Image (cartoon, rainbow, N blue to C red):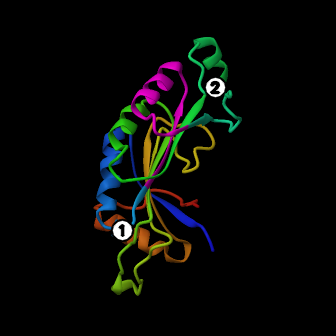
Amino acid sequence: MGNTCAVPVFRTTDARAAYTVGLRLLALADTTEAAVHATLWLSTAADVERAQARLGEGVFMRADYEPLPPDGIPAEPEALAELLPLQVDFEDAPPGSIDEPFLEGVGDNPATFSWWWLTWPAVPEMDLPPELKYADVQVVFNHRSIHLDGPPAADHTVFVHVRYSTRARARWLAAQAGLRIIGDSQHGW
């Protein structure tokens, strides 16, 4: 048992560029078992309306994890305003199934988009075998925390998740994608 070590390797103010870098890192992995986990915060009624139209298959909940009313998200603006912010979550979505509508919904809202269940390749020159359990790529939008805790940010960060004992793999992965480690690691999942 253990947690990943999330290592930042790219930061930009361009959400599409951050996502594209995430795809470059994803291309280094075996994605046979890959799935997407994503969370998008919704801070306005317009955000909620867009998300319901484009991301309706997600699980909507209050950002403070309090339950929604029994009849779901209210249509009345005043009642909805009392519930904000909301979030919409996706767990184990097929890669490519929610990417575009999710990216369109991010705007200025904090969000995280992760490709899970990857396998990092062996790195023989570093004596590292393939890695399945501790192998993820994560793009964090409008925030710098992988858990979306703390204050939002005006930029987006791409992280590679590796085993704590093999942080050198993060440096190797970044280099393969033409990147480098740009800050301190964070405690993953």
Would residue 54 be counted in the magenta stretch?
A: yes
Query: Image check: 173 left or right of 7?
Result: left
In the drawing, what numbered circle is on residue 71? 2
- Front-most of residues 9 and 106: 106
Q: Which residues are magenta?
A: 36-59
Amino acid type, callout 1: Leu
> x, y percentage for residue 188?
57, 60
Query: Image check: 161 left or right of 82?
Result: left
- In the rendered view, tell whether residue 168 sits above or below residue 51: below
User: Which badge, 2 or 1, comes first in the chain's sequence?
Assistant: 2
Q: Write down the quadrant of residue 148 in the picture.
A: top right
Q: Within 10 angstroms of label 1, few (less than 14), some, or many (20 or more) residues?
A: many
Distance between mark 2 and mark 1 Cα atoms:
46 Å
- In the rendered view, tell whether residue 9 sits above or below residue 176: above
Can the viewer see residue 12?
Answer: yes
Q: Secondary structure at mark 2?
A: loop
Q: Quadrant of the C terminus?
A: bottom right
> x, y percentage for residue 89?
52, 42
Q: Secondary structure at mark 1?
A: helix
> x, y percentage for residue 158?
42, 52
Q: Write down the quadrant of residue 151 in the picture.
A: top right
Would residue 33 be counted in the magenta stretch?
A: no
Q: Nearer the viewer, mark 2 or mark 1?
A: 2
Q: Within 10 angstroms of label 2, few (less than 14), some, or many (20 or more) residues?
A: few
Q: Which residue is mark 1?
A: 173
- Front-most of residues 138 and 34: 34
